[in-house]
Structures are given as C-alpha cells and as structure tokens.
C-alpha cells in the first residue's frame, strides 16, 4: 500500500501447513502503508493490467518489474509507472493473450460493475488510459477476466454474496460507469469479485469451492453450486456468519475460487 512493487521467483515460497506463522515476504514496519496489497502469480512476458482507484489503467510487461529478494521492499511504483501521488493501484490483472471472446470485468467498492472487451486494452501502455467513470466517494477496486460462459460472484464485507451470469451483463464502452452488481445495505461495501464457471460447462466444476477469508483470520470453503444464479442487482444470500463477539470488528476480506489441489498463498 505504500507504493512499492517487486517480482520474485515462485519457488521462493514453499508449501506449509495451515495455521503456521509463514515466512516474512517483505521488509515493513507497523505502518498500514507498508501492508502487502497485491500478491499473484504470472509469467515474465504477461501484460500486467494495473488499475487505480480513480479509474485509470496502465499496461506493463511483467519482466519490466525489477526482481528483488523475498525480504526486499521493492522499488517505488512511480519509477516504473506515472501514477499520480494522490492515486493508488487497487487491482492488477496478468494477461497472457488478448483474445476476442474474453472480457474485462471492472467493479467498484459501492457496487457498480461493467464489462468491456479485453481486446480494447491490447494497446494499453505505461502512459495510462481512463477506463471507468466513477461517482463521488467511489473507488474502482477489482479487475477480472471472464467469458460469456462464466458467472460473476460478488461478495460484501457484511457476509452477503450474489452470483449472476456474465452473458447478461451487457458490454459497455471504455469510459462508462456501468450498472449495479448487488444491492448493498447501509454501511456495507463490496468485499471481493471473482469469476466462476457455469454449471454444466466443466465436468470438474464440482471440485471448485469459494474460499472465504475474514479480516480476523477466519476462513472456510463453500461449494460453488451453493451459490445459485440470481438476477443482477439483488441482495444475494448469506455467504458467511461472524462470531457473536466479533460482529462489529470482523468482516469478509476475500472470496476466491479454488480447487482441492490448489495451494493458497
């Protein structure tokens, strides 16, 4: 969150048991600005689609990010991208190929969502491009790839989640605001957005789960077929309940699609 970035080999991290302390991944202090905000895997020649909270996207090849050791802080993002001082990168999407049948799904903290053809970002450079119009007080937080044969899962911080078909989300222009993804209750915001396969499109879909993790460190797996497809813009269903003594302090941190043989970092 403090505006640093680095690249390191995946073999740096070894598989460990659940509930262990883990390894230190970056040099930091108690400041919230030094918390790790994004962690993902990619190939050196992938294009990194970096999206900021103000709706600006930058394109960068992965090998252009300087390599560093496990405990190194990294390099300041302004040294590789012209991100303004009052803006923050909120999502990073690795793209290996810009295919015609794939879309880029963009979602905001206040529940707005839009779908734009991925090919529209093929010529994106490090100079940046406006990709969404935001209302006052809203932030662009998520950028995901999808096809019309997949579903979109949107979860809120208070434990609600909704799933709807990507095909029913009409593609819009690069600078549009989009439409409502789910109806949020007062004080609630979107916690995470993920893409999952539709029923019957993949024989292995029964092995897929939604991994829900809270900010206080609790987590669980939920079968994806427990999230029935609904109309976009609804309240959704309860995805997670919180302990009675932590209802005011705990909240959903992420909802990720995983399989039983996946490893979680």
Image (cartoon, rainbow, N blue to C red):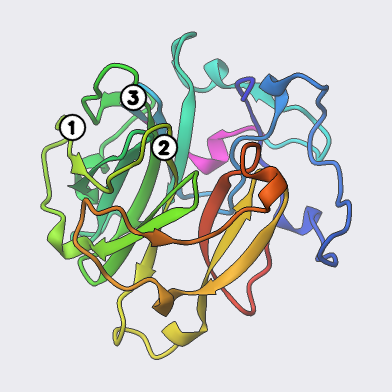
Quarter of the image with the N terminus in it: top right
Q: Say how many tags the image has.
A: 3
Residue assigned mark 3 = 138
**Of label 2 and label 3, which has the lower sequence position?**
3
State left or right for residue 38 relative to residue 181.
right
Residue 170 located within the stretch drawn in magenta:
no
Q: Helix, strand or loop at disc 2?
A: loop
Q: Give the vertical position of 175 relative to 19 (above or below).
A: above
The label shown at residue 265 is: none
Between residues 153 and 125, which one lies in front from this camera angle? 153
Q: CA distance from mark 2 to mark 3?
A: 10 Å
The picture quadrant where one finds residue 17 is bottom right
Which region is colored magenta? 58-66
On the image, which quarter does residue 147 sit in?
Answer: bottom left
Q: Nearer the viewer, mark 2 or mark 3?
A: 2
Residue shown at 70% from the left, 55% from the top: 218
Residue 59 on the magenta segment:
yes
Say if 9 sits above or below 131 in the image. Answer: below
Sequence order check, earlier mark of 1 and 2: 1
Q: Is residue 128 left or right of residue 101?
A: right
Q: Which mark is residue 177?
A: 1
Front residue of this view, candidates 238 and 162: 238
**x, y percent for residue 45:** 49, 49
Residue at numbered disc 2: 189
Above or below: residue 202 compared with residue 70: below
Q: Nearer the viewer, residue 9 or 224?
A: 224
- Whether residue 131 sits left or right of residue 8 in the image: it is left
Q: Position of residue 167 (x, y in %)?
A: 16, 64
Place of residue 142 in the rendered image (x, y in percent of width and height, measured from the top left)? 40, 41
- Residue 101: tell me if it is visible: no
Residue at (67, 23) in percent of width and height: 75
């Amino acid at each position: 969150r403090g505006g640093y970035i680095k690249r390191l080999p995946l073999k740096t991290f070894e598989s460990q048991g659940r509930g262990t302390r883990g390894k230190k991944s970056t040099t930091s202090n108690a400041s919230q600005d030094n918390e790790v905000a994004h962690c993902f895997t990619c190939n050196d020649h992938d294009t990194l689609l970096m999206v900021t909270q103000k709706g600006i996207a930058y394109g960068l090849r992965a090998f252009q990010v300087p390599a560093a050791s496990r405990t190194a802080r990294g390099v300041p993002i302004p040294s590789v991208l012209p991100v303004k001082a009052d803006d923050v990168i909120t999502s990073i999407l690795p793209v290996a190929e810009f295919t015609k049948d794939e879309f880029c799904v963009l979602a905001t903290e206040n529940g707005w969502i839009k779908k734009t053809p991925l090919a529209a970002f093929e010529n994106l450079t490090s100079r940046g491009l406006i990709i969404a119009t935001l209302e006052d007080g809203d932030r662009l937080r998520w950028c995901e790839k999808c096809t019309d044969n997949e579903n979109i899962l949107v979860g809120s911080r208070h434990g609600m989640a909704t799933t709807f078909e990507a095909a029913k989300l009409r593609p819009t222009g690069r600078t549009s605001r989009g439409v409502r993804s789910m109806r949020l209750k007062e004080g609630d915001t979107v916690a995470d957005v993920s893409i999952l396969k539709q029923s019957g499109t993949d024989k292995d879909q029964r092995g897929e789960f939604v991994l829900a993790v809270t900010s206080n460190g609790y987590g669980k797996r939920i079968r994806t077929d427990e999230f029935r497809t609904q109309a976009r813009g609804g309240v959704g269903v309860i995805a997670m309940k919180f302990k009675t003594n932590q209802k005011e302090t705990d909240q959903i941190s992420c909802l990720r699609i995983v399989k039983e043989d996946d490893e979680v970092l």
